[in-house]
């Protein structure tokens, strides 16, 4: 064999070996909180800290595919500043909401004593198939092209409690790591080991799927819905 051919083949083998050996996790985006507002920890321009304490997020999956996100955050610091300055509150809340996995629209917020209430919607967080609504943001997207590494970051709660539920008359089916209750899925920090930064990661393999409570073969519909989104585990 020609020496140049041997050298080229060896270089190709080394290149492919390097691609295979490279840890894909290093190329992924940083971990992302499911609830950015619940993970709030920032300083306002005048030096006032705004820090979240205990928090909860409820995501409601609508029949038309839209989603409503409602957060309740007990503020450990900064409640007076946010209550006194509406424009500051809007800016802080909007930025924090965008730090999460949602694409927040129509962000509204209010302060009641030391509690921050936030509500927004995301019309692009689901796919609809066969009468189901598949909630996709909990499973990070990864490149589908061979030898391409990267993708979205791992998901961590941000909140102390996350609930994914359907609209009235709908039930949500999903990952076994969540606790199913009354047709909804619930994740909490309890029983999970946080990392060295206090983050509790949510390892979701199956997208949650909302199905009408009286639907025929709801389990099969949910499976097909996931299949059509590329997630059929």
Image (tube, rainbow, N blue to C red):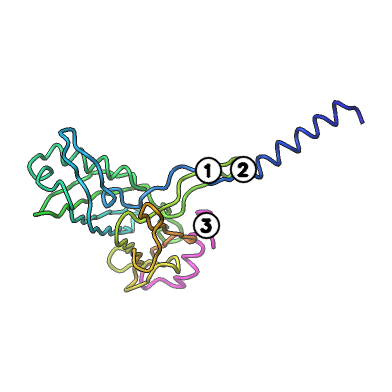
Local SS, label 3? loop
- Which numbered mark, 1 or 3, is in the foreground of this view? 1
Name the residue beneath numbered marker 1: 26
- Report how far apart the C-alphas of labels 1 and 2 lie in the structure: 8 Å
Where does the N terminus fall, quadrant-wise? Answer: top right
The residue lying furthest to the right in this view is 1
How packed is label 1: few (under 14 Cα within 10 Å), some, or many (20 or more)?
A: few
Q: Give the range drawn in magenta.
A: 213-233
Is residue 46 found inside the magenta-colored segment of the image?
no
Which residue: 61% across, 43% down? 22
The picture places residue 12, in percent across and down from the top left corner, at 75, 34
Q: Nearer the viewer, residue 83 or 90?
A: 83
The picture places residue 158, in percent across and down from the top left corner, at 32, 54
Where does the C terminus fall, quadrant-wise? Answer: bottom right
- Tell me, yes or no, whether the two marked residues, 1 and 3, touch with CB atoms within 8 Å: no
- Tell me, yes or no, whether the two marked residues, 1 and 2, touch with CB atoms within 8 Å: yes
Name the residue beneath numbered marker 2: 22
Quadrant of the rendered image containing residue 156:
bottom left
- Counting residues from the start of the chain, the first of labels 3 and 2 encountered is 2
Quadrant of the rendered image containing residue 169:
bottom left
The picture places residue 39, in percent across and down from the top left corner, at 29, 50
Query: Left or right: where does residue 193 sit relative to residue 228?
Result: left
Look at the picture and state if 204 lies above or below 105.
below
- Report how far apart the C-alphas of labels 1 and 3 lie in the structure: 24 Å
Is residue 225 found inside the magenta-colored segment of the image?
yes
- Report how far apart the C-alphas of labels 3 and 2 lie in the structure: 25 Å
Which residue: 45% across, 69% down? 176
Which residue: 67% across, 39% down? 18
């Amino acid at each position: 064999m020609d020496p140049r051919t041997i050298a080229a083949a060896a270089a190709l083998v080394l290149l492919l070996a390097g691609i295979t050996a490279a840890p894909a996790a290093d190329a992924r985006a940083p971990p992302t909180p499911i609830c950015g507002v619940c993970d709030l920890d920032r300083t306002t321009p005048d030096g006032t800290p705004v820090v979240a304490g205990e928090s909860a997020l409820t995501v409601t999956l609508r029949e038309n595919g839209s989603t409503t996100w409602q957060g309740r955050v007990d503020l450990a610091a900064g409640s007076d500043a946010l209550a006194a300055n509406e424009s500051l509150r809007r800016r802080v809340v909007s930025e924090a909401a965008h730090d999460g996995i949602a694409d927040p629209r129509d962000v509204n917020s209010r302060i009641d004593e030391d509690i921050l209430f936030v509500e927004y919607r995301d019309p692009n967080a689901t796919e609809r198939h066969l009468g189901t609504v598949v909630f996709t943001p909990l499973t990070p997207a990864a490149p589908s092209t061979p030898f391409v590494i990267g993708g979205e970051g791992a998901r961590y709660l941000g909140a102390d409690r996350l609930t994914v539920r359907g609209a009235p008359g709908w039930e949500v089916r999903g990952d076994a790591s969540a606790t199913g209750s009354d047709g909804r899925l619930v994740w909490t920090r309890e029983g999970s080991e946080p990392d060295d930064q206090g983050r509790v990661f949510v390892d979701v393999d199956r997208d949650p799927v909302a199905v009408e409570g009286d639907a025929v073969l709801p389990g099969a519909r949910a499976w097909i819905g996931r299949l059509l989104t590329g997630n059929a585990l």
